[in-house]
Amino acid sequence: MPNLLAISFEGSLAPSFDLRCLHPGTKLPDGWGLGYYPGGEPSASVLKEPSPRSGSIRSELVKAWEHLESSVFVLHIRQATWGAISDANTQPFVRTFAGRDYLFGHSGSLRDRLSLPTETSPAFEPVGSTDTELVFCQLLARFAAEEKRALSEVDPDILLAFFDDLSEHGGMTSVLTDGRD
């Protein structure tokens, strides 16, 4: 089952989401989450649910709520590898940096458990205990250290180098957005 979907539109749209992985008779995931930027705002909204039940109320809300309008959506279905099944460990993750909310999600799993660098910024400390959130915090800390205030300001070679270093720990597919890029 694919577990990461990121979609971006030229303008705001309200797509329909049906989380079929929560239908009766299916193997339930360890959680799901949907992040988006309502009304083109710099603030992201995230709906998520750890250890969902078949036909969960939250999944029905996503399917029925016609006001999920945005130009960017990040949907993640979790199969837990690192960290407990909890809200804190359910993607996509959101962090505020330079006046915007960033969303990050990833699919796959790193072979090796990452650890926090010795020089961590309290602004970018993980709330949960997943490898995904740690990668996200390290990436935003790097942006801050280089005084980049938007994703569009980050040199693609810097991103490539970051993920090349990370690939030594295993493969993953990831999505990062600040709601514009």
Image (cartoon, rainbow, N blue to C red):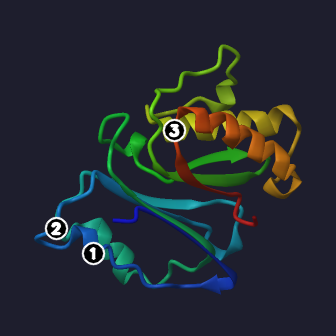
Amino acid tagged 3: Gly
Amino acid tagged 1: Arg
Image: 159 above or below 18:
above
Q: Secondary structure at mark 3?
A: loop
Amino acid tagged 2: Thr
Q: Secondary structure at mark 1?
A: helix
Q: Quadrant of residue 20?
A: bottom left
The Cα atoms of the two marked residues, 1 and 2, are separated by 8 Å
Query: 63 or 181: which is nearer to us?
Result: 181
Q: Which residue is mark 1?
A: 20
The image's mark for residue 170 is 3
Q: Secondary structure at mark 2?
A: loop
Which residue does the image show at 49% across and 35% down from the upper left? 131
Q: Earlier in the sequence, mark 2 or mark 3?
A: 2
Which residue does the image show at 49% across and 59% down from the upper left? 46
Which residue does the image show at 65% across and 59% down from the upper left? 43
Q: Residues within 10 Å of mark 1 (few under 14, many from 20)?
A: few
Q: Which residue is mark 2?
A: 26
Residue 134: percent from the left, percent from the top? 56, 34
